[in-house]
Amino acid sequence: MALVSAKEILENARDGHYAVPAININNLEWTKAVLSTAQEMNSPILVAVSEGAGKYMTGYKTIVKMVEGMMEELNITVPVALHLDHGSFEGAKKALAAGFTSVMYDGSHLPLDQNLAETREIVSIAHAQGASVEAEVGSIGGEEDGIIGTGELADPAECKMMVDTGIDFLAAGIGNIHGKYPENWAGLSFETLDAIKKATGNIPLVLHGGSGIPTDQTQKAVDLGVAKINVNTELQLAFAAATRKFIEEGKDLEGKNYDPRKLLAPGYQAMCDTVKEKITVFGSANKA
């Protein structure tokens, strides 16, 4: 199956009252873990790439070819969208030109008028080639590729203005945070989420910072219209913990376990297990 836009994936999720994971990838192991587990669970999936990860993997063209080639070799039949996460204005245009089927243009740090104008331009470019667009109102807490958000609550009126640009799904700050959640985290603001839902109508909503949010809060957010949940940190932590355990137990010194295919295997399996858990919690299993 070829890469597809995320629009239909997320509209189906909204209508079916489940959420689709958007899993950030960092290399071949990440990509293989996400695609193979989505296929095993019969779940649609968004393969997400930050601009920093894009640079690390040598560029968007490399990523498109890797994902497309892996989908063919693994016989992936579930719907897959290749999505740019927190893209800049120029980054979003470059990703679209390389063959990404979905982009997030993040102008949330800009004055609202500029954010709206640049979002309209990205929407025009993306829709002309059948790709989908996500935009953000209200900064998300924590740090993503050097952009630090305070975790403010989005203004529902501004959310409505953003939806009117023609975007396909909306990310809005409701107290969520990138990275690890602190012990004093106040939790998601469902009052804000409900107000955003009422102001924006039926557009699929996006929850960033999906790593570490309690299951009951995640599922309540899905009930209120969240159709896409981003996950990154949890896979990184799972991969690091499994790799550390393998090395600390001295297993890398046994036989030819220094071979990266063997050295990285426990971390790879830990990522697969984490993706499987997220698909189960978000309710997207057997929804492909």
Image (cartoon, grey):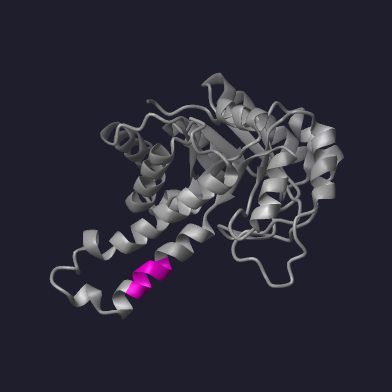
- The answer to which quarter of the image holds residue 187 is bottom right
x and y percentages locating residue 245 in the rendered image: 35, 74
Residue 53: within the magenta? no
- In the image, residue 138 sits, relative to residue 118, either above or below, namely below
x and y percentages locating residue 79 in the rendered image: 46, 30
- In the image, residue 209 sits, relative to residue 39, either above or below, namely below
Left or right: residue 1 versus residue 21 is left
Residue 178 visible in the shown view? yes
Which stretch is magenta?
Answer: 240-245
Left or right: residue 104 versus residue 264 is right
Q: Main secondary structure of the magenta part?
A: helix
Where, quadrant-wise, is the N terminus in this rendering? top left
Q: What residue do we see at 69% from left, 53% from top?
A: 216
Q: What residue do we see at 46% from left, 50% from top?
A: 275
**The one of 249 and 164 positioned closer to us in this rendering:** 249
- In the image, residue 248 sits, relative to residue 36, either above or below, namely below
**The one of 148 and 155 positioned closer to us in this rendering:** 155
x and y percentages locating residue 135 in the rendered image: 67, 39
Left or right: residue 179 versus residue 273 is right
Residue 50 visible in the shown view? no
- The answer to which quarter of the image holds residue 165 is top right
Counting the numbered discs, the total is: 0
Q: Residue furthest left?
A: 255
x and y percentages locating residue 41 in the rendered image: 43, 40
